[in-house]
């Protein structure tokens, strides 16, 4: 699980789309974004598992949205135990436990059945994390939160994809982003596992960006917006796909945020 995005990349391709050369994601130049962060866990053998996530507004003030494959895979069917969410992460590998908020529980949809093939469960590649309070405060009290939107996702509106890609040419130590218009994949545009997902062309986000938010309607201060999807898979040639939250995700979200 050191490279959570890669297994899905190998298994899934986009159909009916031209593949332009990959365009490098850009460094985020707006300073730290407290509502977006890095998920880090001890993967054993001196290795760290890496994903991305975003704080979303919840009653308990303690919910982070990410991808289901960050929590469970066929090779690692149980969520990591020693795991942390670090909001506004920036070159903090040596201090992630001190800077981070401990992940108390992982919530993945029933459809994310890791005994099945990845392509069969991709429509369920979203998850919510509940993080413990720190110094008597919730992560939302300390850093704010994004709104969360469930399907249907408005098309044709600007979306920013944020995350911490950690495979070359990136090192996972700083926030990167891609930007474009929201495009929801239809049955005539993609293979079945990707239908209903959001696609962005010209973005070469790599493993480590998994679970990163797709955000519409960024606030003027650049600290929050509306999370409409989370980073799920990429084609390896400059297309990435975000997984939106279906209506049935509301119950899962309520369990994480109650």
Image (tube, helix red, strand yellow):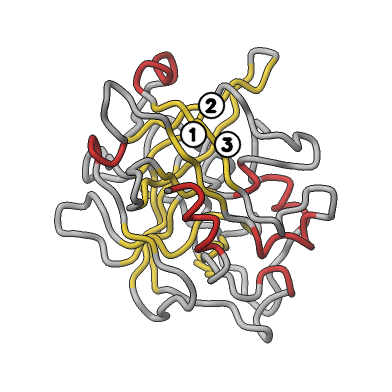
Label number found at residue 83: 2
Rendered image quadrant of residue 167:
top right
How far apart marks 2 and 1 lie (CA) works out to 7 Å
| Nearer to us in this view, 54 or 137 | 137
Q: Does residue 231 sit above or below 143 in this rendering?
A: below
Q: Mark 3 sits on what residue?
A: 167
Mark 3 element type: loop
Label number found at residue 116: none
How far apart marks 1 and 3 lie (CA) works out to 15 Å
Measuring 45% from the left and 75% from the top, which residue is drawn there? Answer: 153
| Residue 102 rendering spot, x and y as whole percentages | 45, 26
Tell me if mark 3 has few (under 14), some (14-19) or many (20+) residues whose alpha carbon lies within 10 angstroms of its own: some
Q: What is the residue that sits farthest to the front in this orientation?
A: 258
Could you tell me if the residues under marks 2 and 1 are in contact, i.e. CB atoms within 8 Å? Answer: yes
Rendered image quadrant of residue 98:
top left
Going from N to C along the chain, the mark reached first, 1 or 3, is 1
Going from N to C along the chain, the mark reached first, 2 or 3, is 2
Q: Mark 1 sits on what residue?
A: 39
Mark 1 element type: strand
How far apart marks 2 and 3 lie (CA) works out to 20 Å
Q: Does residue 182 sit above or below 93 in this rendering?
A: below
């Amino acid at each position: 699980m050191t490279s959570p995005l890669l297994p899905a990349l190998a298994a899934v391709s986009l159909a009916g789309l031209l593949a332009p050369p990959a365009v490098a994601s850009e460094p985020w130049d707006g300073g730290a974004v407290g509502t977006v962060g890095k998920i880090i866990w001890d993967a054993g053998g001196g290795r760290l598992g890496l994903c991305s996530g975003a704080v979303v507004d919840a009653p308990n003030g303690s919910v982070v949205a990410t991808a289901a494959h960050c929590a469970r895979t066929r090779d690692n069917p149980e969520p990591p135990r020693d795991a942390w969410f670090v909001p506004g992460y920036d070159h903090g590998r040596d201090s992630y436990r001190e800077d981070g908020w401990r992940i108390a529980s992982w919530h993945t949809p029933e459809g994310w059945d890791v005994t099945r093939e990845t392509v069969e469960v991709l429509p369920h590649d979203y998850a919510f994390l509940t993080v413990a309070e720190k110094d008597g405060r919730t992560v939302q009290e300390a850093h704010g939160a994004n709104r969360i939107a469930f399907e249907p996702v408005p098309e044709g509106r600007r979306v920013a994809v944020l995350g911490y890609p950690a495979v070359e040419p990136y090192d996972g130590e700083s926030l990167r982003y891609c930007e474009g218009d929201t495009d929801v994949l239809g049955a005539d545009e993609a293979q079945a596992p990707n239908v209903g997902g959001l696609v962005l062309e010209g973005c070469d986000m790599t493993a480590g960006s998994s679970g990163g938010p797709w955000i519409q309607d960024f606030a003027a201060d650049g600290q929050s917006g509306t999370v409409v999807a989370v980073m799920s898979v990429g084609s390896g040639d400059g297309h990435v796909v975000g997984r939106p939250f279906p209506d049935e995700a509301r119950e899962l979200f309520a369990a994480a945020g109650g």
